[in-house]
Image (cartoon, rainbow, N blue to C red):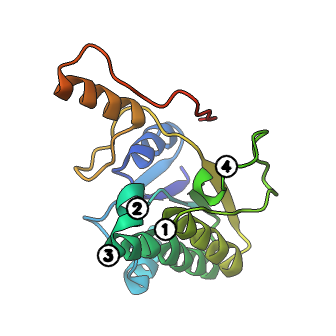
């Protein structure tokens, strides 16, 4: 059975990917407890030992609001959303392994009301979006064996990590429970394609 390594395996996306891929592949899920994705030597050694046919990067710093207002959080977002991608891309290229990387709609400014295509020009309007675009650029500059997937809204069963960000629906439900009010106000003019 072919092996797939999934970094960020305990988050919302990673947990779902592990569940799906383990039906057909030998899946090795790695999270921050098992490996420091920013440590190139550690990552190289682990991938050399595991010899996967595919590496999937589901690691992300996704606290958008915190990245906007806090310089330390912004730097952490740059590390995880940008430089960690570069590290993985260079290592997987050297080992001849394709890399799947997940980015975000935040690389766009949202001005195109008709939506975006793969070749649409990115224009982030916030610091978080800049970190996601940094990851995309470092990926495409570091390897030619990649798949870049831009996600919009994630929903589903929460990830296994205690640091996993809640999905939008889970956040709204939590807000409703905390407020004790029968009604909850949410944005009603936003469209998305999950």
Dot 2 or dot 3: first in sequence order is: 2
Q: Do the residues under discs 2 and 3 have CB atoms within 8 angstroms?
A: no
Residue at position x 36%, y 49% in the image = 11
Dot 1 or dot 3: first in sequence order is: 3
Task: Name the one closer to the observer, 129 or 15.
Answer: 129
Other residues around mark 1 within 10 Å, as few (<14) / some (14–19) / many (≥20): many
* 109 over 13 or under it: above or below: below
Dot 4 or dot 2: first in sequence order is: 2
Tell us which disc is closer to us: 4 or 1: 4
Q: Which residue corresponds to mark 4?
A: 110
Secondary structure, mark 2, is loop
Residue 134: percent from left, percent from top: 59, 73
User: Which quadrant: the C terminus?
Assistant: top right
Q: Do the residues under discs 1 and 2 have CB atoms within 8 angstroms?
A: yes
Dot 1 or dot 2: first in sequence order is: 2
Tell us which disc is closer to us: 4 or 2: 4
Q: Which residue corresponds to mark 3?
A: 72
Residue at position x 38%, y 82% in the image = 39
Identify the disc placed on residue 61: 2
Q: Left or right of 53: which side holds 158?
A: left
Q: Do the residues under discs 3 and 4 have CB atoms within 8 angstroms?
A: no
Task: Name the one closer to the observer, 129 or 90.
Answer: 129
Identify the disc placed on residue 102: none
Q: Which residue corresponds to mark 1?
A: 81
Task: Name the one closer to the observer, 129 or 142.
Answer: 129
* 15 over 169 or under it: above or below: below
Residue at position x 28%, y 66% in the image = 34
């Amino acid at each position: 059975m072919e092996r797939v390594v999934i970094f960020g395996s305990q988050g919302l996306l990673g947990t779902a990917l592990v569940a799906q891929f383990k039906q057909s592949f030998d899946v090795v899920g790695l999270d921050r407890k098992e490996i420091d994705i920013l440590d190139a030597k550690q990552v190289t050694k682990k991938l050399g030992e595991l010899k996967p046919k595919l590496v999937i990067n589901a690691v992300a710093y996704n606290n958008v609001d915190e990245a906007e207002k806090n310089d330390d959080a912004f730097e952490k977002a740059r590390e995880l959303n940008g430089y960690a991608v570069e590290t993985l891309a260079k290592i997987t290229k050297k080992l001849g392994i394709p890399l799947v990387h997940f980015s975000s709609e935040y690389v766009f400014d949202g001005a195109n009301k008709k939506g975006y295509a793969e070749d649409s020009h990115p224009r982030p309007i916030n610091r978080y979006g800049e970190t996601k675009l940094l990851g995309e650029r470092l990926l495409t500059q570091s390897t030619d064996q990649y798949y870049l997937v831009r996600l919009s809204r994630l929903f589903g069963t929460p990830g296994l990590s205690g640091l996993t960000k809640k999905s939008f629906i889970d956040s709204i439900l939590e807000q409703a429970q905390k407020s004790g009010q029968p009604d909850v106000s949410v944005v009603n003019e936003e469209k998305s394609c999950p």
